[in-house]
Image (cartoon, rainbow, N blue to C red):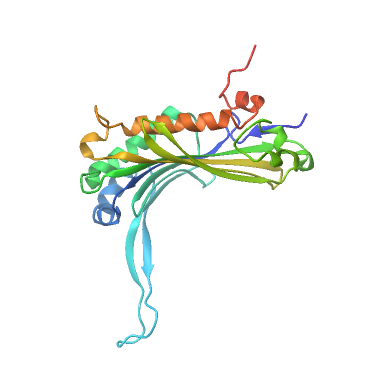
Amino acid sequence: MAAYIPFAGKNSIVEAVLALQFAQSLTPAVAEKFDDLKSEFIADFPSFEKMQVFQFTVGATQLGAATPSQSTAGFNASRLKADGKPSRVFRTMDMNISMHFLEYDHWAETKGAALEGFFRCFKILGLPSAQNPIVAVSLRFIDRFTFDGSPESASAQALLKSDTQYVAPKVLDVGNLWHSNSGWFDSVLDGQNAIHQLNVHSGIEESAFVMVNHGIHSNLVSPVVTAEVNGDSKRLSLEALFNAQHEANTVVLKNLLNDKMLVDIGLVERRS
């Protein structure tokens, strides 16, 4: 009988993104310390490049045609798979620093690698600080499920719980093309305000598929500065915040996907 199968076999994750937002732009520090950052990370990310911004002046000038100016906007570092596609990306842009995992095994390894990269970057940039603290923490998972039968026979009913509250009931009986987008606020850990954005949609390429894109953005009650990166009696650690967001994502999937898929991706144990 045709059914949906997880993108990566043992899991369905196309991409996991862990990100931090600072109070002020990281660009000046990154531009000043770019060579040090490249030396630190080149072994882990063989492609380590500046992200450039070009500024153009519109209109004539007294000296003739204006020439575009170029400046560093951040960095984009990547590690490639054998097929030339990225397996991991590390980047900064404006106020944000993020680690993107396009090959996912399990949460502990992913979280550990992201935090290690962040902390190494912090050491070079002298961040976070009282002048430029971390003000928000974000986690995003993008899951993909592929239908192994005729696209015409695919439907949301084959993947989602019939009583899920995360998509409109209408999508369950409209065939293989549908889309549901929702958002809500809650507290994922000790009063840390968080917004969830959930985008679930189907499509057809070589076969029918469903994408689940769930992002959680937590605005911190107490900004994180250097002394509190690893947490103390008054402030939570970055690791604790990411763990809480990961658990919140698991809760959403357990209330979105049907029991068979939850077993297939390891969120629920198979009954003997």
Q: Is residue 219 visible?
A: yes
Q: Residue at x 37, y 61 (%)?
A: 52
Q: Residue at x 21, y 48 (%)?
A: 131
Does residue 235 lie above or below 198 as drawn?
Answer: above
Q: Position of residue 118 (x, y in %)?
A: 32, 40
Q: Left or right? Give the position of 126 relative to 175.
A: left
Say whether residue 82 is visible.
Answer: no
Which residue is more in the foreground, 168 or 98? Answer: 168
> Residue 258: x and y, percent?
65, 28
Residue 36 is situated, as x and y percent measured from the top left of the image, at: 25, 49
Q: Is residue 87 left or right of residue 27?
A: right
**In the picture shown, does residue 25 fall above or below 17?**
below
The quadrant of the picture occupied by the N terminus is: top right
Image quadrant in which the C terminus is located: top right
Q: Residue at x 39, y 83 (%)?
A: 59
For the image, the number of numbered tags is 0
Pinpoint residue 166: horizontal percent, then vertical percent.
59, 37
